Amino acid sequence: MLRKVLLPRCALSVIALAVAGSSAAVAAPFAYVADRVGGVVSVIDRATHTVVKTIEVGPAPMATAVHPDGSTVYVTIGPLREVAVIDAATSTVVRRIEVGDNPTGIDISPDGRMLYVVNTGDRTVSIIDTASRTVSATVPVDNHPFAVVIHPGGRAVYVAGDYPGNVSVINAATRTVVRTISIGTSLGGMALHPDGSRLYVADSGHDALVVLDTATLQTIRIVPVGRIPLGVAVHPDGTTVYVTNVLDEGFVSVVDTLAYAVIDTIRFPAPIQPQGIAVDSRGDYLYAVSRGLGVVLVIATRTHTVAGIIGGVGSEPTGFGRFMGPVSAETAAPSAKDVRPSLPLPVPPAGPVHRKSRPLLRSTADSVALAVPIDLMPAARIAPGDDIIYVRGDCLWVKDLTTGKDTPITGRPDPQRPEIPICDDARFRSVKHAAVNPARDRIVFVAGEENILPIETKIFLIELQSRTAFQLVPGFVRAGYGGVEFSPAGDIYFCGVSAGDPMRPEGVEDSEVFRVTADLGGWQQVTNIPNRGVADLSLSEDGTKLAFGAMVLSTGNVEIGEANIDGTNVRVLIQGGRLWYDSVHDPEHSPDSSEVVYSRIRLFNPDGSPCGPNGGNPCQDLYRQRFAGTPARVSRIGDTSVIPDWKGTTILYHLRRGPASQPGSWNGTVAVSEDGTAGMAVATDAVFAKFIRSPTAARP
């Protein structure tokens, strides 16, 4: 019998699951689960349900695939742009294979000869010959791929991705995309029916499981499941599909393959955030990997209950890929004749209605602005020659780049030096992003800590002529998360969370773009982006496009996206890896809106040496990139270069070089040419600098 274990997170440890019967005597089958934080792969003995080894593989491993004979395990390592090859007998990395940018999903052909790796960053699939351990072909796809599965017959490879939410069908013989199937916006994992007749795809953007006929490549069913479905697994007998739901207490939906309906929901009283999922070859147990708890939950498939918990798998395990190793002949999967085939059903009516993850919201004037007192310097104004607004010491300043003159805006005069402000207003601690309207008589800025509890990120509006101030959208949990902007018409755009618990740090899950009208008459939600929490907002110079950073809620990856000013036509420029591990941030459009400059965190230099002035520290470099182009580096490698802004032929950004105690260190704002070859220091200790929007010709 299985011993049911349900423990709070504080009590979780390595918990063995006692299993009676003959399976304990079988030669041990293993599962290999990557931990993105620890940089290791945990080896789970499925006979005893314990972690027996951890293998160091490199930073932020994402997915694993076990060779059909169990001899080798392949692991995608996003920040290193490679696949690590593990010898299962010695539990050591014996080879590293260079692939594309930010490899994520991985699968291996049934005969073990070919390995398929999806490179999310550069929109390609690398095909690796497992004998020579070299890339034999690279196949481009039309979106940012995430998951890959191979038909049991080996003839077709299916690749699912984001924006657009397409499944690309690759002919394994010709190594070309022969069909693209449009499903939605953001897709998660996939699994095939054991007889190969059905492909089950998690539509993370619309909370659904999509069923495709692999013969006709047509959608035959759309099954509503939980919020943000991600991992998909099929029972060996073909009767049941299991789907993990990332943001749902019902963390696994159980779908009957004949009725195409959810027949049960597996629940757990804790923040699970499930990721990958797999069924053992006998079909007795389901293994669901929990990012939220840092465990693997073992579920009895007959009762659909949590039967045990395997700890010791790190703080952010994924379970993506084919992480279950083979077993001995005594417990092999049933043959095709033992599998109940999936029966054909009529195609549903055209245009099925998908559920939206969040409703669009509006407000009235009484919830837009709250008058607040504020200290303004006596000479606070925006002069015609002023070029930038920036933050220094929790006060706002403006600067004329031609004359070098600095003018403080907020704060009260120092009695000893009246031209220098005292910046000690507790409400405005951690002043960050600021922007000036085209008329140069209004300033908006963000204040408050975003990453501590309670969450208190706020937006303030200063009316310079009347010397009054308002807190905008005071009822929001987060307002101005990652930036705030004026449109050419004077409307205010920001990212935020309209409602929720300020003590809940996951508030970014509900972050969208909002607009406050120039007359402060109301606010409106602009975007409704599935499977994304958005931040780092900027507007194009002509006010027609939004650029933003986003966290992919299902995987935790960070990306740069773009949309029209009304929130339509969402697309992804580039998807990086996990936060602080090869992630991307802070986009800003070029003056002609044809490309974007953004910050990207790196752990290693192009030559493989550790990144950062002291070695081993992450560095943040600026890159500029067209939506259909290759990124070009702007800043010097090794520095921390963030929060760019772009106007005319000049890019402005915050540069930090070396720790403050180190000779030659520097911290402040610089202005450089578009290619980064020439520049100048703008101001020491000046951060979050932004060009002042102007209706006149761009300066400098």
Image: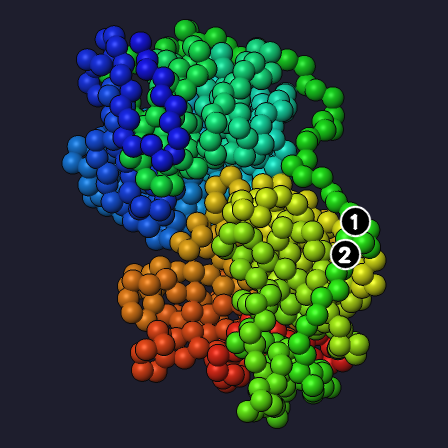
Q: Position of residue 564 (x, y in %)?
A: 71, 54
Which disc number belongs to residue 245?
Answer: none
Residue 363, disc: 1
Q: Mark 2 points at which residue?
A: 368
Q: Where is residue 585 in the image (x, y as percent from the top left)?
A: 52, 59
Q: Residue 610 at what x, y percent from top left?
A: 29, 63
Say left or right for 236 vs 185: left
Residue farthest along the front direction in this orientation: 415
Going by the picture, which residue comes out furthest to the left? 90
Label 2: how many Cα within 10 Å (few below 14, some 14–19, many 20+): many
Q: What residue type is labelled 2?
A: Val
Residue located 48% across and 79% down the image:
685
Q: Is mark 2 on a helix, strand or loop?
A: loop
Q: Which of 588 and 113 is in front in this view?
A: 588
| Residue 45, above or below 405 | above
Label 1 secondary element: loop
Residue at (66, 45) in percent of width and height: 499
> Mark 1 packing: few (<14 Cα in 10 Å), some, or many (20+)?
some
Q: Is residue 30 visible?
A: no
Q: Do the residues labelled 1 and 2 touch (CB within 8 Å)?
A: yes
Q: Which of 530 and 422 is in front in this view?
A: 422
Amino acid, disc 1: Ser
642 vs 361, left or right, is left
Q: Can residue 347 be seen in the rendering of this structure?
A: yes
Compared with 517, 647 (above or below) is below
Residue found at x 67% / y 58%: 494
Query: From the viewer's perspective, is 619 left or right of 327?
Result: right
- In the picture shown, does residue 623 fall above or below 554? below
User: Which of the marked residues, 1 or 2, is nearer the chain's N terminus?
Assistant: 1
